[in-house]
Amino acid sequence: MSPAPLPELDPAFFDAAQTARAWPFEEARKLVKRLEKSGKGEALFETGYGPSGLPHIGTFGEVARTTMVRTAFRLLTRDEIPTRLICFSDDLDGMRKIPDTVPSKEAMEPHLQKPLTSVPDPWTNEFTSFGDHNNAMLRRFLDTFGFDYEFASATDYYKSGKFDAVLLRAAERYDDIMKVMLPTLGAERQATYSPFLPISPISGRVLYVPMKEVNAKDGTITFADEDGGDTTLPVTGGNVKLQWKPDFGMRWAALGVDFEMFGKDHQTNQVLYDRICAILGGTPPEHYVYELFLDSEGQKISKSKGNGLTIDEWLTYASTESLGLYMFQKPRVAKRLHFDVIPRQVDDYYAHVAAYQTQDVAARLENPAFHVHYGDVPNPEVPLSFALLLNLVATANAQETKVLWGFISRYIPGASAASHPELDKLAGYAVRYFNDKVKPLKTYRAATEQERAALQDLHDRLAAHEGSIDAEELQNLVYEIGKTHQFEPLRDWFKAIYQVLLGEDQGPRFGSFIALFGVAETRALIAEALAGKLLKTA
């Protein structure tokens, strides 16, 4: 999922991009204007990562969305301006609490408040520190999705001197930074606050202590160390790091970041980041603030509560591309991130990909598939929907995909897992999703007298269609029976079919289901439902 090979695109894409309305283009246009004004010859994108935990679904979303904007920028500029994406790890941050996932909390306790890259790796001897371990997990995570990025470590940047010039400027403009920060703090916090966090030479901990002196001429700070005595340290060379809010602005100024997006929880601090960036001689980057995810109850997702959906859980039941679609759609609207959103995203993804094949260039740039694939949209052959496969799994009681292929190969003569690998992958997702997430919640109900008569009629009249795979003809038959038995509105007839035969409130186009499942099998299913056997099974 790296940026598309833009030079291979039809030149018409570059022309159409100038008026494209999709949100990545709107954000990229701001960046084009920024570079036109500054004369800068490169666009630098950044995403941030806190390595106290492992990468998560939000990490994917932030990098994927940033890459969408980056791709749009490359199109708007005809790929003539170089772009870079830095994924920055704040690994010099002190370990404020011990993660629940470590093998031994007791072994980690002596290292509380030490920089994450000074805390031993709690799992293996493969990495030199806890921070290095989690950084490696981040890089592995991003590489899995094929993102094009440069990894940056705060520890390396602070210690190597890459931040030294701006840190010295922070010492010179200490009072200006304090004027920005102090009004945002309570009285007690104001009394001890400093944007500089020294790393104690005695304990190795990151200290939250007031400054006794900030010497701008020498570039040093003086503070009371953990033994009670005064210690003076240079602000350069990794001896000191900045508090996280000033650190945002410092990093933007030091690196010349042009674009960074972040969650709504950062929005109130954005003005602080920007002002500190300006104080330190930089120009604040273009921002994009996205909404946070909600759980199934509409509550904000919390890592500590574990009330969200992990990326591993999503990818157990659906493709990366379906997750990419979820991230693309309405980033500024709070959306539920729960298992029940997956089927719709899967089918919508394939619908967008199918539509892309017949669209003109302008429409393609508005199509989510273009942004999900960063311009390099495939054309997989997927003739069946995820929703239809889920119902097939249910009625066939399938525990593995080869059961489904018995039905699929009859519906699509000559089709096999080898000839339709994308469909086979989708069938595998359907088997897992149904058995794990749908089956435990299925609830069948008995038919009413009206529904019983209509279902019996459907059962009897299907006999004349034995062996048919004509989905449209079968769908018309279902419609006809619903009208004959005077269902008003007609959707109540289909709702009855789904609830009585499939144990769900909604389902696929039923004519397509009959064609796939089989006429004889559908008649048997109706007979079982009317005999009350499905109720007993449930």
Image (cartoon, grey):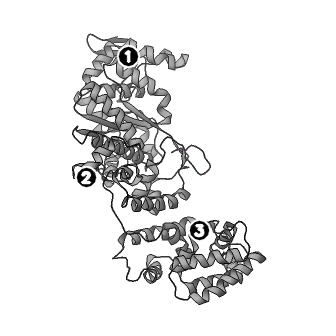
Residue 501 in the magenta stretch? The answer is no
Tell me, yes or no, whether the two marked residues, 1 and 2, touch with CB atoms within 8 Å.
Answer: no
Residue 238 seen in this snapshot? no
Left or right: where does residue 217 sit relative to residue 276? Answer: left
| Magenta segment | 296-303
Q: Residue furthest right?
A: 449
Left or right: where does residue 284 sit relative to residue 393? Answer: left
User: x, y (%) of residue 63?
Assistant: 37, 44
Residue name at image x 68 percent, y 71 percent: 493
Q: Which residue bears the numbered disc 2?
A: 10
Tell me, yes or no, whether the two marked residues, 3 and 2, touch with CB atoms within 8 Å.
Answer: no
Say which of marks 3 and 2 sits in front: 2
What amino acid is labelled 1 in the image? Phe
Sequence order check: which comes first, mark 3 or mark 1?
1
Residue name at image x 65 percent, y 70 percent: 494
Say which of marks 1 and 2 sits in front: 2
Residue 301 in the magenta stretch? The answer is yes
Viewer-side residue, 27 vs 524: 27
What amino acid is labelled 2 in the image? Asp
**What main secondary structure does the magenta stretch of the protein show?**
loop
Mark 3 vs mark 2, CA separation in Å: 40 Å
User: x, y (%) of residue 149?
Assistant: 28, 44
Q: Secondary structure at mark 2?
A: loop
What amino acid is labelled 3 in the image? Gly
User: x, y (%) of residue 511?
Assistant: 56, 76
Q: Which residue bears the numbered disc 3?
A: 507
